Image (cartoon, helix red, strand yellow):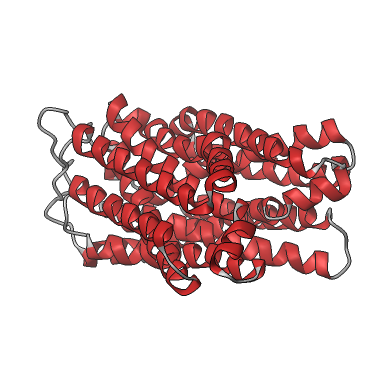
Amino acid sequence: MPLALLALAVVAFGIGTTEFTTMGLLPQIADGVGVSVPQAGNLVSAYALGVVIGAPVLTGIGARIPHKRLLLLLSGLFVIGNAASAVAPGYGLLFAARFLAGLPHGALFGVGAVVASRLVAPDRAARAVSRVFLGLTVANIVGVPAGTALGQQLGWRWAYCAVAVIGLAALAGLAAFVPHQPRGAQAGIRHELRAMGNRQVAIGLATAVVGFGGFFAVYSYLVPMLTHLTGISDSSTTLVLALYGVGMTVGTLVAGPLTDRALRPTLYAGIALLAAALVTLFFTIHSTIPALVTVTFIGAMGSLITTPVQMLLMVNAKNAPTMAAASNHSAFNLANAAGAWLGGLVISAGWGWAAPSLVGAVLAVAGLGLAVTGGLLDRGGRPSEVITSSPVPMAEATEPNLS
Protein backbone atom coordinates (compact mmCIF):
# COMPACT_ATOMS: atom_id res chain seq x y z
CA MET A 1 0.00 0.00 0.00
CA PRO A 2 2.69 2.54 -0.95
CA LEU A 3 0.32 5.46 -1.63
CA ALA A 4 -1.58 4.99 1.63
CA LEU A 5 1.70 4.83 3.57
CA LEU A 6 2.96 7.86 1.64
CA ALA A 7 -0.12 9.84 2.68
CA LEU A 8 0.50 8.90 6.31
CA ALA A 9 4.17 9.87 5.96
CA VAL A 10 3.16 13.28 4.59
CA VAL A 11 1.10 13.81 7.76
CA ALA A 12 4.19 12.96 9.83
CA PHE A 13 6.27 15.32 7.68
CA GLY A 14 3.90 18.21 8.41
CA ILE A 15 3.90 17.40 12.13
CA GLY A 16 7.68 17.30 12.30
CA THR A 17 7.98 20.55 10.37
CA THR A 18 5.59 22.54 12.56
CA GLU A 19 6.95 21.09 15.81
CA PHE A 20 10.61 21.96 15.25
CA THR A 21 10.42 25.01 12.96
CA THR A 22 9.04 27.09 15.84
CA MET A 23 12.34 26.62 17.71
CA GLY A 24 14.29 28.15 14.82
CA LEU A 25 11.98 31.14 14.50
CA LEU A 26 11.69 32.23 18.13
CA PRO A 27 13.44 35.61 17.63
CA GLN A 28 11.20 36.49 14.67
CA ILE A 29 8.05 35.36 16.47
CA ALA A 30 9.04 37.31 19.59
CA ASP A 31 9.48 40.49 17.53
CA GLY A 32 6.24 39.86 15.66
CA VAL A 33 4.00 39.58 18.73
CA GLY A 34 5.95 41.92 21.01
CA VAL A 35 7.32 39.53 23.64
CA SER A 36 10.76 38.40 24.79
CA VAL A 37 12.45 35.34 23.28
CA PRO A 38 11.99 33.32 26.52
CA GLN A 39 8.27 34.14 26.44
CA ALA A 40 8.14 33.07 22.82
CA GLY A 41 9.79 29.83 23.90
CA ASN A 42 6.63 29.06 25.86
CA LEU A 43 4.96 28.50 22.49
CA VAL A 44 7.05 25.32 22.16
CA SER A 45 5.72 24.25 25.56
CA ALA A 46 2.15 25.06 24.47
CA TYR A 47 2.49 22.72 21.51
CA ALA A 48 4.01 19.98 23.68
CA LEU A 49 1.21 20.38 26.22
CA GLY A 50 -1.30 19.94 23.42
CA VAL A 51 0.42 16.71 22.40
CA VAL A 52 0.46 15.30 25.93
CA ILE A 53 -3.23 16.09 26.52
CA GLY A 54 -4.53 15.46 23.03
CA ALA A 55 -3.10 11.98 22.46
CA PRO A 56 -5.20 10.12 25.06
CA VAL A 57 -8.17 12.51 25.02
CA LEU A 58 -8.77 12.61 21.27
CA THR A 59 -8.18 8.88 20.79
CA GLY A 60 -10.63 8.27 23.64
CA ILE A 61 -13.25 10.56 22.11
CA GLY A 62 -12.76 8.90 18.73
CA ALA A 63 -12.66 5.33 20.05
CA ARG A 64 -15.73 4.28 18.03
CA ILE A 65 -15.02 6.35 14.91
CA PRO A 66 -13.67 4.34 11.93
CA HIS A 67 -9.95 4.90 11.58
CA LYS A 68 -10.00 6.62 8.20
CA ARG A 69 -12.66 9.11 9.26
CA LEU A 70 -10.77 9.77 12.49
CA LEU A 71 -7.57 10.42 10.53
CA LEU A 72 -9.41 12.95 8.35
CA LEU A 73 -10.91 14.73 11.37
CA LEU A 74 -7.55 14.90 13.16
CA SER A 75 -5.80 16.16 10.02
CA GLY A 76 -8.44 18.85 9.64
CA LEU A 77 -7.81 19.94 13.23
CA PHE A 78 -4.07 20.03 12.48
CA VAL A 79 -4.68 22.31 9.47
CA ILE A 80 -6.94 24.60 11.52
CA GLY A 81 -4.37 24.88 14.32
CA ASN A 82 -1.56 25.87 11.99
CA ALA A 83 -3.72 28.24 9.96
CA ALA A 84 -4.78 29.89 13.23
CA SER A 85 -1.10 30.17 14.20
CA ALA A 86 -0.40 31.99 10.94
CA VAL A 87 -3.09 34.65 11.47
CA ALA A 88 -3.01 35.00 15.29
CA PRO A 89 -2.82 38.77 15.99
CA GLY A 90 -1.18 38.57 19.43
CA TYR A 91 0.73 36.36 21.81
CA GLY A 92 -2.27 35.03 23.72
CA LEU A 93 -4.12 33.80 20.64
CA LEU A 94 -0.88 32.44 19.17
CA PHE A 95 -0.29 30.46 22.37
CA ALA A 96 -3.81 29.01 22.09
CA ALA A 97 -3.30 28.23 18.40
CA ARG A 98 -0.06 26.34 19.09
CA PHE A 99 -1.83 24.32 21.79
CA LEU A 100 -4.60 23.56 19.28
CA ALA A 101 -2.06 22.53 16.62
CA GLY A 102 -0.44 20.13 19.10
CA LEU A 103 -3.67 18.41 20.15
CA PRO A 104 -3.95 16.01 17.14
CA HIS A 105 -0.19 15.27 16.99
CA GLY A 106 -0.09 12.10 19.11
CA ALA A 107 -3.48 10.85 17.99
CA LEU A 108 -2.47 11.18 14.33
CA PHE A 109 0.69 9.16 14.92
CA GLY A 110 -1.13 6.58 17.03
CA VAL A 111 -4.04 6.04 14.65
CA GLY A 112 -1.65 6.22 11.69
CA ALA A 113 0.56 3.49 13.17
CA VAL A 114 -2.41 1.17 13.75
CA VAL A 115 -3.73 1.80 10.23
CA ALA A 116 -0.28 1.23 8.69
CA SER A 117 0.17 -2.07 10.55
CA ARG A 118 -3.12 -3.31 9.07
CA LEU A 119 -2.29 -2.37 5.49
CA VAL A 120 0.44 -4.99 5.08
CA ALA A 121 1.23 -8.62 5.83
CA PRO A 122 1.79 -9.39 9.54
CA ASP A 123 5.54 -9.92 9.09
CA ARG A 124 5.92 -6.41 7.62
CA ALA A 125 3.92 -4.45 10.21
CA ALA A 126 6.93 -2.74 11.79
CA ARG A 127 8.27 -1.76 8.36
CA ALA A 128 4.95 -0.11 7.57
CA VAL A 129 4.98 1.79 10.87
CA SER A 130 8.59 2.87 10.29
CA ARG A 131 7.60 4.29 6.88
CA VAL A 132 5.12 6.54 8.64
CA PHE A 133 7.83 7.72 11.06
CA LEU A 134 10.09 8.33 8.06
CA GLY A 135 8.08 11.46 7.31
CA LEU A 136 9.08 12.85 10.71
CA THR A 137 12.79 12.22 10.14
CA VAL A 138 12.72 13.66 6.61
CA ALA A 139 11.10 16.76 8.10
CA ASN A 140 14.31 17.30 10.10
CA ILE A 141 16.35 17.22 6.88
CA VAL A 142 14.06 19.17 4.54
CA GLY A 143 10.98 20.57 6.25
CA VAL A 144 12.55 22.26 9.27
CA PRO A 145 15.43 23.98 7.40
CA ALA A 146 13.04 25.05 4.62
CA GLY A 147 10.41 26.27 7.06
CA THR A 148 13.00 28.16 9.07
CA ALA A 149 14.44 29.79 5.95
CA LEU A 150 10.96 30.71 4.70
CA GLY A 151 10.07 32.26 8.05
CA GLN A 152 13.32 34.21 8.21
CA GLN A 153 12.97 35.57 4.67
CA LEU A 154 9.23 36.22 4.34
CA GLY A 155 8.08 36.30 7.95
CA TRP A 156 7.31 33.62 10.50
CA ARG A 157 3.60 33.53 9.62
CA TRP A 158 4.44 32.10 6.19
CA ALA A 159 6.09 29.08 7.81
CA TYR A 160 2.81 28.15 9.49
CA CYS A 161 0.93 28.84 6.24
CA ALA A 162 3.23 26.37 4.49
CA VAL A 163 2.56 23.74 7.16
CA ALA A 164 -1.19 24.26 6.74
CA VAL A 165 -0.80 23.64 2.99
CA ILE A 166 1.17 20.45 3.74
CA GLY A 167 -1.67 19.41 6.03
CA LEU A 168 -4.22 19.98 3.25
CA ALA A 169 -2.13 17.86 0.87
CA ALA A 170 -1.96 15.11 3.48
CA LEU A 171 -5.72 15.35 4.03
CA ALA A 172 -6.33 14.85 0.31
CA GLY A 173 -3.94 11.90 0.23
CA LEU A 174 -5.61 10.23 3.20
CA ALA A 175 -9.03 10.67 1.63
CA ALA A 176 -7.87 9.22 -1.69
CA PHE A 177 -5.60 6.35 -0.73
CA VAL A 178 -6.24 5.06 2.81
CA PRO A 179 -8.85 2.27 2.75
CA HIS A 180 -11.86 2.25 5.01
CA GLN A 181 -11.20 0.42 8.28
CA PRO A 182 -14.40 0.01 10.34
CA ARG A 183 -14.04 -0.47 14.08
CA GLY A 184 -14.76 -3.91 15.52
CA ALA A 185 -17.45 -4.80 18.01
CA GLN A 186 -15.03 -4.29 20.92
CA ALA A 187 -14.16 -0.72 19.94
CA GLY A 188 -14.80 1.90 22.59
CA ILE A 189 -13.23 3.97 25.31
CA ARG A 190 -13.67 1.22 27.92
CA HIS A 191 -11.56 -1.24 25.93
CA GLU A 192 -8.92 1.40 25.20
CA LEU A 193 -8.62 2.31 28.88
CA ARG A 194 -8.46 -1.35 29.84
CA ALA A 195 -5.55 -1.81 27.41
CA MET A 196 -3.81 1.19 28.96
CA GLY A 197 -3.97 -0.59 32.32
CA ASN A 198 -1.83 -3.44 30.98
CA ARG A 199 1.42 -3.70 32.96
CA GLN A 200 3.51 -4.04 29.80
CA VAL A 201 1.96 -0.90 28.31
CA ALA A 202 2.88 1.04 31.47
CA ILE A 203 6.45 -0.27 31.34
CA GLY A 204 6.67 0.55 27.63
CA LEU A 205 5.54 4.14 28.21
CA ALA A 206 8.00 4.49 31.11
CA THR A 207 10.76 3.18 28.85
CA ALA A 208 9.88 5.83 26.28
CA VAL A 209 9.90 8.67 28.84
CA VAL A 210 13.17 7.67 30.51
CA GLY A 211 15.07 6.29 27.51
CA PHE A 212 14.14 9.12 25.17
CA GLY A 213 14.82 11.58 27.97
CA GLY A 214 18.47 10.68 27.38
CA PHE A 215 18.15 11.48 23.69
CA PHE A 216 16.52 14.86 24.34
CA ALA A 217 18.96 15.82 27.11
CA VAL A 218 21.53 16.21 24.32
CA TYR A 219 19.26 17.27 21.43
CA SER A 220 17.92 20.23 23.40
CA TYR A 221 21.43 21.68 23.86
CA LEU A 222 23.12 20.38 20.73
CA VAL A 223 23.54 23.79 19.07
CA PRO A 224 25.26 25.52 22.04
CA MET A 225 27.35 22.39 22.62
CA LEU A 226 28.62 22.50 19.05
CA THR A 227 29.24 26.25 19.03
CA HIS A 228 30.90 26.47 22.45
CA LEU A 229 32.91 23.24 22.46
CA THR A 230 33.31 22.04 18.88
CA GLY A 231 33.84 25.51 17.43
CA ILE A 232 31.20 25.25 14.72
CA SER A 233 29.86 28.63 13.58
CA ASP A 234 26.25 29.64 14.11
CA SER A 235 25.69 29.70 10.35
CA SER A 236 26.73 26.05 10.06
CA THR A 237 24.48 24.65 12.78
CA THR A 238 21.53 24.25 10.38
CA LEU A 239 23.62 21.92 8.24
CA VAL A 240 24.67 19.99 11.33
CA LEU A 241 21.05 19.58 12.40
CA ALA A 242 20.29 18.33 8.88
CA LEU A 243 23.10 15.79 9.34
CA TYR A 244 21.41 14.77 12.59
CA GLY A 245 18.25 14.28 10.57
CA VAL A 246 20.12 12.07 8.10
CA GLY A 247 21.13 9.84 11.00
CA MET A 248 17.52 9.73 12.18
CA THR A 249 16.37 8.73 8.68
CA VAL A 250 18.90 5.90 8.45
CA GLY A 251 17.88 4.67 11.89
CA THR A 252 14.21 4.66 10.90
CA LEU A 253 14.89 2.74 7.68
CA VAL A 254 16.83 0.09 9.58
CA ALA A 255 14.35 -0.10 12.47
CA GLY A 256 11.45 -1.54 10.48
CA PRO A 257 13.07 -4.76 9.19
CA LEU A 258 14.94 -5.35 12.45
CA THR A 259 11.79 -4.91 14.54
CA ASP A 260 9.86 -7.30 12.32
CA ARG A 261 12.56 -9.93 12.90
CA ALA A 262 13.23 -9.36 16.62
CA LEU A 263 11.31 -6.66 18.45
CA ARG A 264 12.81 -6.70 21.93
CA PRO A 265 16.44 -7.38 20.88
CA THR A 266 16.20 -4.40 18.52
CA LEU A 267 14.93 -2.24 21.38
CA TYR A 268 17.64 -3.42 23.77
CA ALA A 269 20.44 -2.94 21.25
CA GLY A 270 19.18 0.49 20.21
CA ILE A 271 19.01 1.85 23.77
CA ALA A 272 22.39 0.32 24.69
CA LEU A 273 24.07 1.82 21.62
CA LEU A 274 22.40 5.17 22.32
CA ALA A 275 23.86 5.16 25.84
CA ALA A 276 27.31 4.28 24.46
CA ALA A 277 27.09 7.04 21.84
CA LEU A 278 26.10 9.64 24.44
CA VAL A 279 29.14 8.74 26.57
CA THR A 280 31.31 8.88 23.44
CA LEU A 281 30.03 12.37 22.66
CA PHE A 282 31.38 13.60 26.00
CA PHE A 283 34.90 12.78 24.75
CA THR A 284 34.52 13.67 21.04
CA ILE A 285 32.63 16.95 21.32
CA HIS A 286 35.86 18.98 21.18
CA SER A 287 36.90 17.65 17.73
CA THR A 288 34.82 18.52 14.66
CA ILE A 289 34.81 15.30 12.62
CA PRO A 290 34.50 12.85 15.56
CA ALA A 291 31.76 15.04 17.06
CA LEU A 292 29.75 15.11 13.82
CA VAL A 293 30.08 11.35 13.37
CA THR A 294 28.92 10.78 16.95
CA VAL A 295 26.01 13.20 16.58
CA THR A 296 24.87 11.41 13.42
CA PHE A 297 25.05 8.06 15.21
CA ILE A 298 23.03 9.43 18.15
CA GLY A 299 20.35 10.54 15.71
CA ALA A 300 20.30 7.08 14.14
CA MET A 301 20.02 5.26 17.47
CA GLY A 302 17.29 7.60 18.71
CA SER A 303 15.18 6.78 15.65
CA LEU A 304 16.07 3.10 15.77
CA ILE A 305 14.31 2.90 19.16
CA THR A 306 11.12 4.64 18.03
CA THR A 307 9.62 1.82 15.96
CA PRO A 308 10.15 -1.05 18.44
CA VAL A 309 8.71 1.04 21.29
CA GLN A 310 5.66 1.85 19.17
CA MET A 311 5.18 -1.78 18.16
CA LEU A 312 5.74 -3.00 21.72
CA LEU A 313 2.88 -0.84 22.96
CA MET A 314 0.60 -2.01 20.16
CA VAL A 315 1.49 -5.65 20.86
CA ASN A 316 0.68 -5.41 24.55
CA ALA A 317 -2.43 -3.28 24.11
CA LYS A 318 -3.99 -6.37 22.46
CA ASN A 319 -7.23 -5.56 20.63
CA ALA A 320 -7.41 -1.87 21.62
CA PRO A 321 -4.03 -0.45 20.55
CA THR A 322 -4.97 3.06 19.42
CA MET A 323 -4.76 4.96 22.71
CA ALA A 324 -1.56 3.15 23.72
CA ALA A 325 0.01 3.94 20.33
CA ALA A 326 -1.01 7.59 20.60
CA SER A 327 0.12 7.90 24.23
CA ASN A 328 3.60 6.91 23.09
CA HIS A 329 3.90 10.39 21.62
CA SER A 330 2.76 11.95 24.88
CA ALA A 331 5.62 9.98 26.43
CA PHE A 332 8.05 11.37 23.84
CA ASN A 333 7.04 14.92 24.72
CA LEU A 334 7.39 14.24 28.43
CA ALA A 335 10.83 12.84 27.64
CA ASN A 336 11.60 16.03 25.73
CA ALA A 337 10.63 18.19 28.70
CA ALA A 338 12.39 16.00 31.30
CA GLY A 339 15.56 15.60 29.26
CA ALA A 340 15.82 19.31 28.55
CA TRP A 341 15.21 20.13 32.22
CA LEU A 342 17.84 17.71 33.53
CA GLY A 343 20.35 18.77 30.89
CA GLY A 344 19.78 22.40 31.85
CA LEU A 345 20.27 21.60 35.52
CA VAL A 346 23.81 20.27 35.05
CA ILE A 347 24.74 23.18 32.80
CA SER A 348 23.41 25.68 35.36
CA ALA A 349 25.32 23.83 38.09
CA GLY A 350 28.56 24.64 36.27
CA TRP A 351 29.36 21.14 35.03
CA GLY A 352 29.97 22.41 31.49
CA TRP A 353 28.28 22.20 28.12
CA ALA A 354 29.32 18.57 27.63
CA ALA A 355 27.59 17.40 30.81
CA PRO A 356 24.14 16.78 29.21
CA SER A 357 25.66 13.89 27.26
CA LEU A 358 26.46 12.08 30.52
CA VAL A 359 22.99 12.86 31.89
CA GLY A 360 21.56 11.44 28.68
CA ALA A 361 23.66 8.28 29.02
CA VAL A 362 22.39 7.71 32.57
CA LEU A 363 18.79 8.12 31.43
CA ALA A 364 19.36 5.75 28.50
CA VAL A 365 20.79 3.09 30.81
CA ALA A 366 17.78 3.51 33.10
CA GLY A 367 15.50 3.15 30.08
CA LEU A 368 17.34 -0.03 29.10
CA GLY A 369 16.76 -1.38 32.60
CA LEU A 370 13.02 -0.74 32.26
CA ALA A 371 12.94 -2.37 28.82
CA VAL A 372 14.75 -5.48 30.04
CA THR A 373 12.46 -5.68 33.07
CA GLY A 374 9.46 -5.61 30.75
CA GLY A 375 11.01 -8.36 28.65
CA LEU A 376 11.58 -10.60 31.66
CA LEU A 377 7.98 -10.13 32.77
CA ASP A 378 6.60 -10.71 29.28
CA ARG A 379 7.85 -14.23 28.61
CA GLY A 380 5.12 -16.33 27.08
CA GLY A 381 2.91 -13.31 26.37
CA ARG A 382 0.12 -13.63 23.76
CA PRO A 383 0.82 -11.84 20.44
CA SER A 384 -1.29 -8.86 19.45
CA GLU A 385 -4.17 -9.05 17.01
CA VAL A 386 -2.73 -5.89 15.45
CA ILE A 387 0.28 -7.86 14.21
CA THR A 388 -1.25 -11.29 13.62
CA SER A 389 -4.30 -10.00 11.74
CA SER A 390 -4.59 -10.27 7.98
CA PRO A 391 -3.75 -7.26 5.82
CA VAL A 392 -6.64 -5.07 4.72
CA PRO A 393 -7.58 -5.35 1.02
CA MET A 394 -7.66 -2.06 -0.82
CA ALA A 395 -10.93 -2.78 -2.55
CA GLU A 396 -12.92 -3.82 0.52
CA ALA A 397 -11.14 -3.08 3.78
CA THR A 398 -12.30 -4.90 6.91
CA GLU A 399 -11.14 -4.93 10.50
CA PRO A 400 -9.18 -7.99 11.63
CA ASN A 401 -11.00 -10.47 13.83
CA LEU A 402 -10.92 -8.99 17.32
CA SER A 403 -12.53 -11.91 19.08
Where does the image place residue 403, in percent across and percent down from the top left?
Answer: 16, 49
**Which residue occupies the foreground of this view, 273 or 354?**
354
Q: How many marks?
A: 0
Q: Quadrant of residue 195?
A: bottom left
| 387 relative to 190 in the view: left or right | right
**Identity of the residue furthest to the bottom in this view:** 92
Instruction: Residue 348: tell me if it is visible.
Output: yes
Where does the image place residue 29, in percent across and percent down from the top left?
Answer: 57, 60
**Identity of the residue furthest to the top in this view:** 2
Q: Does residue 279 sit above or below 121 in this rendering?
A: below
Where does the image place residue 31, in percent across and percent down from the top left?
Answer: 61, 63
Q: Quadrant of residue 55?
A: bottom left
Q: What residue is shown at x 68% (from left), y 43% (from top)?
A: 274
**Which residue occupies the foreground of this view, 369 or 230?**
230
Q: What residue is shown at x 35% (from left), y 29% (from top)?
A: 123
Q: Does residue 113 sit above or below 221 in this rendering?
A: above
Instruction: Residue 265: tell me if it is visible.
Output: no
Where does the image place residue 25, in percent across and percent down from the top left?
Answer: 59, 53
Quadrant position of the N terminus in the picture: top left
Q: What residue is shown at x 89% (from left), y 37% (from top)?
A: 287
| 295 relative to 321 in the view: left or right | right
Q: What residue is shown at x 67% (from left), y 62% (from top)?
A: 340
**Which residue occupies the foreground of this view, 168 or 150?**
150
| 116 relative to 260 in the view: left or right | left
